[in-house]
Amino acid sequence: MNIQWYPGHMTKTRRMIEADIKLVDAVAELTDARCPEASRNPILDELIKDKPRIIILNKSDYADEQTTKNWKSYYEGKGAAVLICDCRSGKGVNYFVPLLKKKLSHIIEKRHARGMKGLSLRVMVVGIPNVGKSSFINRMANSRKVKVADKPGVTRGKQWVTIDREIELLDTPGILWHKFGDPEVAKKLAFTGAVKDEVMDGAELAAEFISMYPDALKERYGANTLEEIAVNRKMLASGGVPDISRAAITLLDEFRAGKLGRISLEQPAEPAFRI
């Protein structure tokens, strides 16, 4: 599955992160809990460097619960701070501030010692497209200060969002790398919607998903193929022919919305970890 996806605004985003990283005290890196490693852009390691970082396993309500806990233990075992949450429902988001303050306790103590108690902690929010950065910020701010949509490429410019007198978040557009060398990574990102559907064959992608998760398909649709989904859901083209394209779109949309059950696309294993 060869996916090429690197629009011009992502080059601009990279430059933006490089310029603004010096303005923040820490980085909140959002990932998709269904595929935490596949949804972590290796370019960010180069851009973030040694800034304190919190890995946020978002969309946890869509992922297998035990697998997500395993990922949390795995990352923590490597010295990372980790938050499991679901920004759509708000589950777990309230643990972010305590975790951040614990991670940055050395900075807070140093500022207090210097009498600098009024300074906010500044956090850059990063991640690939469609992992939920805007939803996370909206939850933190308890408002819709940034645009949210269930598709990649919505946030196109940076903006500061004040959470309270102690914390400011810098929203950034999602950034993907220019070429997916590992077809497995490309496949997982395509499944979760990190790449726009227009740049791939939806029927091929859906068929690939079916081959990997036949039980989920059977339970949801009572079907084994896209043709059967189309027939069961009465998705028929002229002449009563099963509309495969429409069935594929439905399958992918419903997986992304968590309607096929809690499915994790990868398990923690060496040597994937990067930080």
Image (spheres, grey):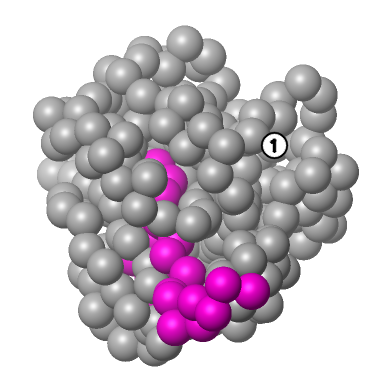
Camera-nearest residue between 183 and 259: 183
Quarter residue 196 falls in: top left
Specify whether residue 218 is in view. no
Position of 110 with respect to 134 (left or right) is right
Q: Residues within 10 Å of mark 1 (few under 14, many from 20)?
A: some
Q: Position of residue 163 (x, y in %)?
A: 40, 82
Q: Is residue 190 above or below residue 95?
A: above
Q: Residue at x 30, y 74 (%)?
A: 161
Camera-nearest residue between 171 and 235: 171
The quadrant the C terminus occupies is top right
Q: Residue at x 37, y 45 (%)?
A: 21
Q: Amino acid at mark 1?
A: Glu
Give the magenta part as a residue range: 113-140
The quadrant the N terminus occupies is top left
Q: Is residue 263 above or below residue 144?
A: above
Position of 94 with respect to 64 (left or right) is left
Q: How many numbered tags mark residues here?
A: 1
In the rendered image, residue 180 lying in the magenta stretch gets the answer no
Specify whether residue 239 is in view. yes
Q: Position of residue 141 (x, y in %)?
A: 38, 83
Q: Residue at x 43, y 75 (%)?
A: 120
Q: Which residue is mark 1?
A: 266
Q: Residue furthest front?
A: 114
Camera-nearest residue between 110 and 183: 110
In the rendered image, residue 123 lying in the magenta stretch gets the answer yes
Q: Residue at x 47, y 11 (%)?
A: 181
Q: Position of residue 200 (x, y in %)?
A: 28, 27
- Element type where label 1 sits in the image: loop
Quarter residue 123 falls in: bottom left
